[in-house]
Amino acid sequence: MATRRLRPSLVSLSVVLILVVVSVVGFGLTRRNNDQQEQALLQSNTSQAAAYASEIFSGLATSLSSVACRVHKLDFTPGRMISTYQMLDTVRSSGAYTASGWPTEAALARADAPVTS
């Protein structure tokens, strides 16, 4: 019995070659499309982060401007601010508050705070 060796025909080789070329081209196009989508997503996320940071910083600038205006109007000096904070800390630590949440007159008197009605 003689063994017969199978040889691929020209048609089958052509089909295999076309499939390989189509696969390689498809892979390249898919990879390029994927890179473009990632780049667009990264750019979108960067734009969103920039808008969010801008919103936060503009709100912070507004708050700081408001505080600076109030401090300037009240003519607070650093020493006066420290004494005010110490007085507020004394009132807060006394724990004597009214039902509405305001410190009692006795707590304000212990802290040497002005009592206003």
Image (cartoon, rainbow, N blue to C red):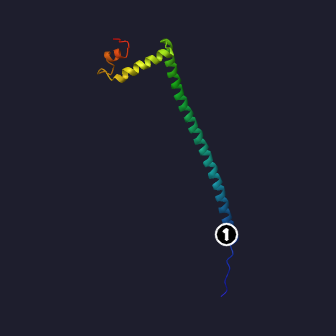
Residue at point 52%, 19% (across, down): 65
**Direction right: furthest residue:** 10
User: Residue 100, how many percent across, how many down?
Assistant: 31, 21
Q: Is residue 10 above or below residue 42?
A: below
Give me the residue at 35% from left, 16% from top.
110
Q: Residue drawn at (36%, 24%), measured in percent from left and top?
A: 93
Residue 92 picture quarter:
top left
Q: Position of residue 37 (x, y in %)?
A: 59, 45
Q: Residues within 10 Å of mark 1 (few under 14, many from 20)?
A: few
The quarter of the displayed image where residue 36 is located: top right
Left or right of 86? Residue 53 is right
Position in image of residue 52 (x %, y %): 53, 32
Q: Is residue 45 left or right of residue 7?
A: left
Amino acid type for the residue under numbered disc 1: Ser
Task: Please say whether residue 9 is visible from this viewpoint.
Answer: yes
Quarter occupied by the N terminus: bottom right
**Nearer to the camera, 11 or 20:** 20
Residue lying furthest front: 110
In the image, is residue 77 above or below residue 10?
Answer: above
Please tell me whether mark 1 sits on a helix, a strand or a loop: helix
Q: Is residue 69 visible?
A: no
User: In the rendered view, does 42 fall on the left or right side of 11?
Assistant: left
Q: Residue at x 63, y 51 (%)?
A: 31
Q: Position of residue 72 (x, y in %)?
A: 51, 13
- Please tell me which residue lies in front, 104 or 14: 104
Quick one: 13 or 83, which is closer to the camera? 83
Which quadrant does the C terminus fall into? top left
- Check the image and name the residue furthest to the left: 99
Residue occupied by mark 1? 12
Q: How many marks?
A: 1
